[in-house]
Amino acid sequence: MGLEEQQIIFEEEESIDIVAIVLRMLKYWYFILIGVVIAATIAYFYTKFTSAVYEVNTTLMVKAETSSASAEKVLEDMDLFSKKTNIQNEIVILQSYSTIRRTIKQLDFSVSYYSNNGYTLTELYHSSPFVVIYDSSALQPIDIEFNLELIDDNKFKLTSHADEIDLYSYKTDKIISQSLDFDIDKVYEFGEVIKTKECVFKIIRSPKPNIPFSPNLSYQFIFNSLNQQTLAYKKIVEIDLLRKDVDVLNLSLKGNNKNKITDFLNMLSSVYIDENLEKKNSMANNTITFIDNQLTKITDSLSFAVNRLQDYRSANKIMDLDFQSQQLFEKLSTLQIEKATFVSNREYYKYLINSINRLEGLDDLMVPATMGITDISLNKLVMELVDLNTTKLAITGNSSEKSFVIKNIDNKISNIKKLILVNLQNIIEANNIYLLDIENKINALNKELMQLPKKQQKLFGFERQFQLNDAIYTFLLQKRAEAQIAKASNLPDSEVIDEARVDVAVKTSAKLNQIYLIALVIGLLIPAILIYLDYVLKDQIQSRKDIEQITKTPIVGGIIQYKKPVTKVFIEHPKSIIAESFRSFYTNLQYFTKGKENQIILVSSSMPQEGKTFNSINLASVFASFNKKTCLLSFDLRLAKVHHAFDIKNDIGLSTYLINHSSIQDIIFPTGINKLDIIPAGPVPPNPVELIASNKTEELFQFLKSNYECVIIDSPPVGVVADGLLLAKYSDVNVIVARQSHTKKKALAAVIKELEANDIENTAMLFNGIKQSRIHGYGYGYGYGYGYGYGYHKEESNPWWKNLLKSKKT
């Protein structure tokens, strides 16, 4: 498989080592324990400082088709009381500012009372041991906390402080902002008037029995404005359809005091139903008022006509019309009644036009059906106009800013007004045509009347005037009676199916065992996720599998990390575990080189501080211990490190040999270890690459191969400089060192790619610095440090306290 395919596997198909992750989590068990302890502590304080949250519900049926209770024909004419209900509009009305404001006003949430046990603030709804009675005509400071401390049965201490306050008038419902300090710190008696320039109120003991002050609690109260309470509840009340197939609304509310939210929901339902009934009754009241005004006008005319008719009969001793006159009178009376109806309708049309054209609201508008006008289109348009106006009034509240909903309603109202005016124009024209026709018929009958005797003519005229006024009067009385009956039979369009109840309130906040269970899960999960992310996202080599995912190059050894600061660990601690790992490395190399007698082994890495020099020294020591004549070359010309391990001077070495200042024999030094010699790097040259590329290097390796069984080359990092690539052509095996938790995955992949690009064969991997743990028997911290100067980054030594922390972590 080529390197590019290996790289694809490394970047795109890297599998997750479950065992390694589990072992890593077990290794960092104390992080998980700390996470659990922190989560449990947070859960404990959460339960102490957080009040329980409850939810209550009520269901409300909204009738899609509403009507008055009577089914009589007389009420069917009054379509005012029969209409279809838009369920979405009703939801808007229920959640409107005006409806919620009226609800809160009914309940009186003007003062909130609280107790505090040192952990949790609890609202005392109808259960406070004291009551605040304020002067509604005076200003009161809102949204600031008053603290009450009981001194004895008759006295208490009241304290409060605020830098800037808002003063509120309960009478006018207005807020006045003040940038003044507010301070109260004084002892008062119960019932004593507390009067300052910012407030006037008194505090009395609760009139309810069995609500004493508790010595373990502190008490507070706050003045609330109606507007703020309305806005607060408007945000939290939720209204939805119970099911899509029924017109039943589910009203729900969450809060810390289940008694308070229960009362609110029940009052909200009651206010909504009352408002609906008031709206229907107001329509009937508007009709009755209009008819009463018309009756007032016609009553005087009727009385005058009756008196004049009676006076004429008495004066002329004539009681009834003759047969011919009676026939004319009946015809004329019929026409007069028809005329009266059209005249009455004309008055209503004028009233309707004036009402629509005025700028004020349409809440007192009377629908056509109440006057016996049966035009279906006109009745429907006026009814829709009344409904839209009612909805607008409900949701507008006290806000002058028009929302999208209000603007939409205004547009609909404007369009309906235009349609009504066009409709009225056509109706009035038709009404005038009918009136003209009736007038012509009346005039024809009047000509016949002129042929009657004078007394009969006068009596006929008086009778006709009386009958006309009496017909109008009777018609109006009938319509008023119908409106009164309709009002009496009105029923609300909604009804409560299930009231909100305290005993079925649901606790929505988590229970104690649930809170601690969640805390346990979070305490375990967060550290585990962090450990997992650290494992997955870390770019350093962590395991043998990481190397195998990057390259198919065989791994010939694994060197554990040694805790003691010793470089020649194989010589000084030959029975240690790390010495055994070097012996294993040596054995694997023998299989890799297939038993070659004269071996040249190059040791390099992808980057500095990966332990190549450390491994070169100890590998050379292993070969020498097996009685193989070995030479260790310090070919890292930029930063010589090998000579320090053997206390050999670096005055001459490879650099002086390569520039012909020394012979090969001059630069070979014994190490004091049997069978092991060393060639130091020598002084740092200005051109290491050029020197290594010279023929002198080849001569050197020919000499060494003839005189030594094994040659170990300590090469500079291949991933940093090109020296190692030049030396690789002389070696039989090229060992690339990868250090756990240090070697970058991408850097190692780049080195492997570079070696393959230069046709460097016989490459092997050495996994260095494998950290021991109680889990898999290896240890951390072999104490080896690598430093570079000329062209490399030099590793800084850590302070003693950092080393101490590091050793504790490992």
Image (cartoon, rainbow, N blue to C red):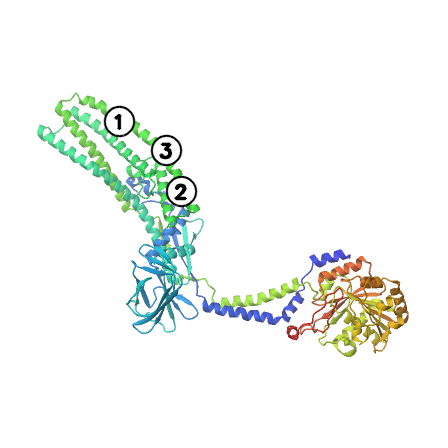
- Picture coordinates of residue 585, whole percent (x, y): 79, 71
The label shown at residue 410 is 2
Inspect the image, locate mark 3, and give the three-letter code of the amino acid beneath it. Val
Location of the C terminus (image quadrant): bottom right
In whole angstroms, how far apart are the C-alphas of marks 3 and 2? Answer: 19 Å
Nearest to the eye among marks 3 and 1: give it.
Answer: 3
Inspect the image, locate mark 2, and give the three-letter code of the amino acid beneath it. Asp
The label shown at residue 438 is 1
Judged from this view, the residue extending furthest toward the top is 451
Inspect the image, locate mark 1, and give the three-letter code of the amino acid beneath it. Ile
In whole angstroms, how far apart are the C-alphas of marks 2 and 1? Answer: 41 Å
- In-image side of 329 versus 626 (left or right): left
Nearest to the eye among marks 2 and 1: give it.
Answer: 2
- In-image side of 803 versus 108 (left or right): right
Location of the N terminus (image quadrant): bottom right
In the image, residue 476 sits, relative to residue 91, either above or below, namely above
In whole angstroms, how far apart are the C-alphas of marks 3 and 1? Answer: 25 Å
Q: Secondary structure at mark 3?
A: helix
- Picture coordinates of residue 92, whole percent (x, y): 40, 49
Q: Secondary structure at mark 2?
A: helix
**Which residue in the structure is indicated by mark 3?**
422
Q: Which mark is first along the chain, 2 or 3?
A: 2
The picture quadrant where one finds residue 282 is top left
Q: Secondary structure at mark 1?
A: helix
Q: Is residue 143 visible?
A: yes
Nearest to the eye among marks 3 and 2: give it.
Answer: 2
Q: Which mark is first along the chain, 1 or 2?
A: 2
The picture quadrant where one finds residue 551 is bottom right
